[in-house]
Amino acid sequence: MNKTTRIFSITHEQDVDGLFCGAILKNAFRNTLVFLTNHGHQNAKKVAEVLEKNIAKSKKPGTIIFSDLSINSTEDVNEIEESSVKAKEYGWDLIWLDHLYWNEEIKSRVRSFANLILSPEHEQRCAAELVYQQFAKDRTACRRMAEFAHIVDFRLPGIQKLSPLPEIISYYRSIPINIASSNNWSKTSPEEYFGTKTYKTNMIANIFLYERLLSRRLLNLSPHTRYAITLSR
């Protein structure tokens, strides 16, 4: 993988760890789109739908990266497996990173279509740290995001010194807005799937909210370091 690789990040929308997984990938790979989702069967169905209708139609393959999303039921695996296998047939690679418990049957199923990277419980690494270590070890902003996510995810004492990012995320998630564009990847040409076109997320349509959340003011980064999960550029 290089900096021009197409990345489709499917990540947890509900907390700092999941959002920073997408932000790290966006920082490390300029051709990245982020799809925010959550746990549960209906969300698994939506992910499968996105993969089947959009990724499989792209003429230029890349890498699909699931992060901070565990699977606890065979029903959820069934939803995602078929569309993932089809994406692989079109030349896409699949990587799945998580730090929660997975039972052996589910792990075996997912490993049949994706490179599954799990953090052993005793290592105490969150998903953002896994993403950083795999894809962005040479990037200072990504390291700081991973460190921030680690403190928040494991509720370490240093959390009191951080910006109230978890509370801000909860606030914005509670706002009943839907500013999603009517555009869909499946309605655009394959070369427009990644880069400039808008795309739908299932719950948080206005990703520009997170551009503020991930800005230098909240993370105390230098003015030169800005990163965001974006809908369009």
Image: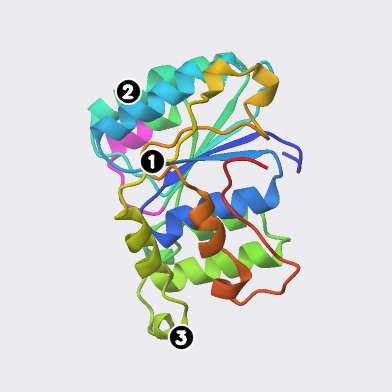
Check residue 178 in the rendering and tell me which mark sits there, or answer none.
Answer: 1
Q: Which quadrant would the C terminus be assigned to in this image?
A: top right
Q: Nearer the viewer, mark 3 or mark 2?
A: 3
Could you say which quadrant of the image residue 104 lies in? top left
Q: Amino acid at mark 2?
A: Glu
Q: Which residues are magenta?
A: 99-108
Task: Provide the residue designation for mark 2.
Answer: 79
Q: Is residue 135 visible?
A: no
User: Magenta stretch: residue 51 in it?
Assistant: no
Could you say which quadrant of the image residue 159 lies in? bottom left
Label 1: how many Cα within 10 Å (few below 14, some 14–19, many 20+)? few
Q: Amino acid at mark 3?
A: Lys
Label 3: how many Cα within 10 Å (few below 14, some 14–19, many 20+)? few
Q: Nearer the viewer, mark 3 or mark 1?
A: 1
Point out residue 157 in the picture as x, y percentages from the top left corner: 38, 85
Q: Is residue 35 above or below residue 170?
A: above
**Colour mapping:** rainbow
Task: Provide the residue designation for mark 3.
Answer: 161
Q: Is residue 166 above or below residue 3?
A: below
Kindly identify the residue that appears in the image at 59 percent across and 66 percent down.
215
